[in-house]
Image (cartoon, helix red, strand yellow):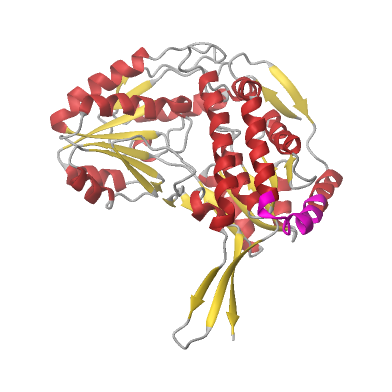
Amino acid sequence: MIQSINPFTGEILKEFDPFDELQIEAALAKSEAAFRKWKNSDFSDRKKLMKSAAQELRKNRDDYALLLTQEMGKVIKESQAEIEKCAWVCDYYADNAENFLKSKSIELPDGAAAKVIYQPLGAILAVMPWNFPFWQVFRFAAPTLMAGNTGLLKHASNVPQAALAIQKVFERAGFPEGVFQTLLIDSKATNKIIADPRIKAVTLTGSEKAGSAVASTAGKHIKKSLLELGGSDPFIVMADADVKKAAQTAAKARMINFGQSCIAAKRFIVEESVFEEFVEVFKQEIQSMKFGDPENPNSDFACMAREDLAFELYEQVEKSVKAGAKILLGGKKPEKGKALFEPTILTDIPKDAPVYSEELFGPVASIFKVKNETEAIALANDSEFGLGGSLWSQDLQKAEKLAAEIETGAVFINSLVASNPHLPFGGIKKSGYGRELSQEGILEFVNIKTVYLG
């Protein structure tokens, strides 16, 4: 059974049977049949439907948000913001897809001409995680469907209600049957679906292990894959930064979604002359945040998405303390049977501690002291991950120069890292490859075809 469990209360909300082979086959056939018509639809029709999806999200925002809160534990105000962001990305691609995919004329040196045209590929499979149950899916679905592809969703097993609700959003918006479908399946079925010739490409947001498995299967069958994996984002504070603002933002950056975010700041790298000031403000900000029922609009944090995740995070902290790291705040062992976790701050972290190199997917902050900007950049780059980074300095010319040296897919100067439909999103190294959002995102799953005019 696939179970939907409220991580804050432990209550089993609903149970679902995984799709059998007949249901999977029916979904694949329906997706292929829908593509044959959908690929020839006018952009004006696609735009109208995607705008309708945005309206559906906004109209029923509170209902969808409550579902997210009950199913994966994020506080209600963050769930509401997530639904709003999904509507935003729907509007963005509804308004811009036609222009992004407009054919381009090329004049060649010999006087001949050519065109570059953009055509949809077919059915695209999305393997999505639980931490942003709606947003991760919509940032895939909005550009993919607007490009003329059809979408199939394999969501995380602990958010089946969210997965089914997303299909309902597109159905209520009026999208033709089969253009977007949710599959309640396990990883074995996922590999078989990737191998199916009707699937033309696959995108995954998730762990390094899951990404490697999906990419291997896709590569075996010569299919494109896009991976958005983990991150251990550096948050660098130079001596000339607005330290108070940096520390206040840092606390927010670490605690968004209770730290369960690929682009949450995780490693705080601070120049020694402002280290004590930064740590004190950061600690105060974390302590001022309110724990409570995730359905309470005044709660700043509640729980992790699953009990096992809380204990895995504690194990990373425990091993790091044994290696020499010091606990400045928190660090207590979670209570058995619950998904609760106490916000934790670690300092004096040795290189052999797990928190030095591993991703911390929860409310644990690692703070490092460095002598200068050279040490700061070296430490920031001493990671297998390369998703995002934040850099704080009031000298913008210096900040831009340093940003170019940071090995990540994005650097935000004097701001926390955030995804935005207008900006390309993705990483390098073990944080994955390919880009989502912006024009780059919609071009990932189209055939960029050259037409030579002789």
- Please state which of residues 292 and 321 is positioned toward the viewer in this rendering: 292
Q: Quadrant of the C terminus?
A: bottom right
Q: Residue at x 46, y 40 (%)?
A: 419
* Position in image of residue 346 (x %, y %): 31, 26
Q: In the image, 163: left or right of 299?
A: right
The image shows residue 422, relative to residue 61, as above or below, that is below
Q: In the image, 397: left or right of 116?
A: left
Q: Residue at x 18, y 47 (%)?
A: 398
* Position in image of residue 70 (x %, y %): 63, 20
The image shows residue 27, relative to residue 36, as above or below, that is above
Q: In the image, 441: left or right of 275?
A: right
Q: Quadrant of the N terminus?
A: top right
The image shows residue 254, relative to residue 94, as above or below, that is above
Q: Is residue 40 magenta?
A: yes
Residue 11, quarter of picture: top right
Q: Main secondary structure of the magenta part?
A: helix
Residue 285, quarter of picture: top left
Give the farthest residue toward the bottom. Answer: 110
The image shows residue 432, relative to residue 254, as above or below, that is below
Give the farthest residue toward the right. Answer: 22
Q: Residue at x 60, y 20 (%)?
A: 7
Span colored in magenta: 30-44
Q: In the image, 355: left or right of 199?
A: left
- Please state which of residues 318 and 182 is positioned toward the viewer in this rendering: 182
